[in-house]
Image (spheres, coloured by chain):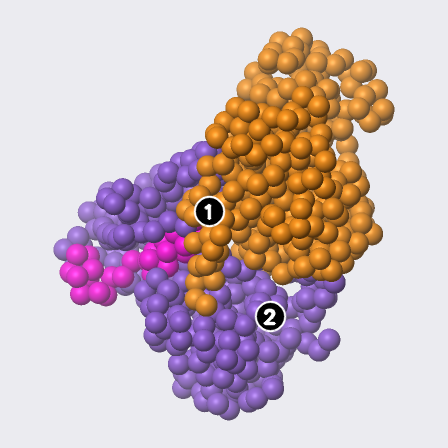
Chain colours: A orange, B purple
């Protein structure tokens, strides 16, 4: 079997990290990189990410990379939003590539863009390719992992989960989008203006869980509240004085007939330990049996997203044509050997 | 769509619990029960399990139940061992039924019975049915859940997991098979004689993890040690005086080139809290990133196994023909609505 040939579309923080991981994987070759940032044009992949020995040139024009028959799979890491990545997914599918994207809304596109999801599914089938949205969250912690845990339950009345993380390692874009370092008033203005966005993915996680369990949600309510610090906190890209905002407590409730079935909470802030808040991923299923899960500290978001994107490659290569979500494909798994051998043995007998 | 028609093969503690769960499920009908115990002959299902209003008669002769075209799926809960259930799986497959079994060795039959696994896979394909072994452990806690967690990792050097449970609710058979209430000498004699068996499933869990990750294990070593109690412990079916055996600490190591890659530990005892041991399921992945997961208390074994068997029904009905394992099928999920509606919408667009 030849190497699996991968195109990376989007060489930002996530795409760059994915590229590093892929360069280390046996049985797989990065054959193309698409990124329209002017500073990257003409550079090789390894020059741009400062890692490895890849001579693959970075190109701004997708059509110059997506030549028929030259690649097997595209990894799309350009935007969080389904409508933004749709033209890219369409172009890659028409070139005959299977696709993995970390666009948050693509983790369950039917949640907010059902028409777009139907079009992508039809397109994928017409082009004989499979498409998956994944990531750490949405994609795993607050949806796939919860769904997997429900497998041990005979009945469930309610699901509650919380992901408490530390934003300190992130850059200025994340500080702004979570309102870190603002005043309470600025925070509420930012939420109203749409510049402080909180977490992208609650609708997707909620609807993925509901669909897996056969629940119908009448409404999904969301609230973004400022996490007011009582102490001074600082990180490389933000300083928070007492009384100012250390981050955004974003909560979502999925309800049916006025009753809350799913509560997902994701307070994101810098230095939560400054006020004795322990980071972690927490899942509480009220049912038969009751389940209490903790992962401490939380699964790190950046590495986790890169890993999910890379690790789902064998599953997507083997999936039937169509648009898939994490609940539809086999459980994610790190693959540590040659991906081609894994593809041969994924079905243990054949 | 008609009701999904299920045959239950084996109406012991697990089969009976599965039957109760199935009787509550909309869109699904128990159409046959096979059990050869003389006391159950002629009884109806509901008489035998003391639940519901099922008039389905219990029959000893499988051929009298497995009539062509009368059922969709068989749930086989008769034995822990693959060779024991093989004739039953064969008979159900030839009758055209998809199959779920909770036989521990069937969770990954290639581990100890590769020829039998190959025969079952070929048979399933010839009969156009799908076959799955599942359960809480093997089947979930020490394999599927670990595999799912590795999905967030870019690299892994070692996996360690421990399942600490309380045997107090279980009956005399389990007390004997774990050596509860024996002396240290009796325990070692029982292990040597094969009457104290510890946990059934380590080889299966180890090989499922290894196959998912692309690892090769040279050896799987196992050790069964007595858990000597320093205090008096008692349960409905056992009394343990200080200095006697409260249970069996069963540990397995999966190694390659002398290096341990996977350590699975399953100490099973009555009343661990008597010596301040907290029950729970613990997974520790040493890798990038490092992951520490706890589920406290542990997922209960009995309900968990029943739930896994019931909850995998939609996945098995929709799987391609063949022998499957938990790593090959979509993540398990509790299904709380009508199973037929779930089958319609499992692929979110179609």
Q: Is residue A144 above or below residue B16?
A: above
- Which chain is home to disc 1? A
Disc 2: which residue: B317
Q: What segment is highlighted magenta in the picture?
A: B187-213
Residue at 58% of width from left, 21% of height from top?
A169
Disc 1: which residue: A27
Q: Is residue B337 above or below residue B322?
A: above
Please tell me whether residue B70 belongs to the stretch shown in magenta. Answer: no
Q: Is residue B211 left or right of residue B33?
A: left
Is residue A278 at least partly visible in the picture?
A: no
Residue at 60% of width from left, 58% of height from top?
A319
Which of these two is toward me, B232 or A71?
A71
Please tell me whether residue B191 belongs to the stretch shown in magenta. Answer: yes
Q: Is residue A190 left or right of residue A250?
A: right
Residue at 80% of width from left, 47% of height from top?
A113
Place of residue A265 in the rendered image (x, y in percent of width and height, measured from the top left): 67, 35
Mark sitting on residue B52: none
């Amino acid at each position: 079997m030849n190497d699996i040939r991968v195109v990376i579309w989007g060489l930002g923080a996530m795409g760059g990290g994915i590229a590093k991981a892929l360069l280390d994987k046996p049985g797989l070759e990065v054959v193309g990189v698409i990124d329209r940032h002017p500073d990257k044009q003409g550079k090789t992949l390894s020059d741009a990410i400062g890692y490895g020995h890849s001579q693959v040139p970075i190109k701004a024009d997708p059509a110059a990379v997506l030549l028929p028959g030259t690649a097997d799979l595209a990894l799309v890491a350009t935007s969080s939003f389904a409508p933004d990545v749709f033209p890219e997914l369409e172009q890659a599918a028409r070139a005959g590539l299977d696709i993995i994207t970390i666009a948050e809304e693509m983790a369950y596109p039917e949640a907010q863009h059902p028409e777009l999801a139907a079009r992508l599914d039809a397109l994928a089938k017409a082009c004989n390719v499979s498409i998956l949205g994944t990531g750490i969250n949405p994609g795993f912690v607050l949806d796939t992992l919860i769904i997997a845990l429900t497998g041990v339950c005979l009945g469930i009345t309610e699901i509650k989960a919380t992901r408490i993380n530390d934003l300190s390692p992130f850059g200025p874009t994340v500080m702004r989008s979570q309102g870190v370092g603002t005043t309470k008033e600025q925070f509420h203005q930012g939420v109203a203006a749409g510049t402080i966005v909180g977490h992208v993915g609650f609708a997707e996680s909620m609807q993925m869980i509901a669909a897996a369990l056969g629940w119908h949600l009448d409404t999904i309510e969301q609230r973004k509240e400022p996490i007011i610090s009582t102490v001074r906190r600082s990180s490389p890209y933000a300083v928070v004085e007492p009384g100012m905002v250390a981050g955004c407590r974003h909560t979502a409730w999925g309800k049916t007939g006025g009753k809350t079935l799913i509560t997902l909470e994701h307070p994101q802030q810098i230095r939560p330990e400054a006020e004795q808040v322990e980071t972690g991923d927490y899942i509480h299923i009220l049912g038969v049996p009751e389940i209490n899960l903790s992962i401490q500290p939380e699964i790190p978001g950046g590495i986790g997203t890169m890993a999910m994107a890379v690790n789902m490659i064998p599953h997507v290569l083997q999936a039937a044509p169509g648009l898939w979500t994490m609940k539809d494909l086999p459980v994610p798994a790190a693959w540590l050997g040659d991906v081609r051998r894994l593809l041969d043995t994924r079905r243990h007998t054949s």
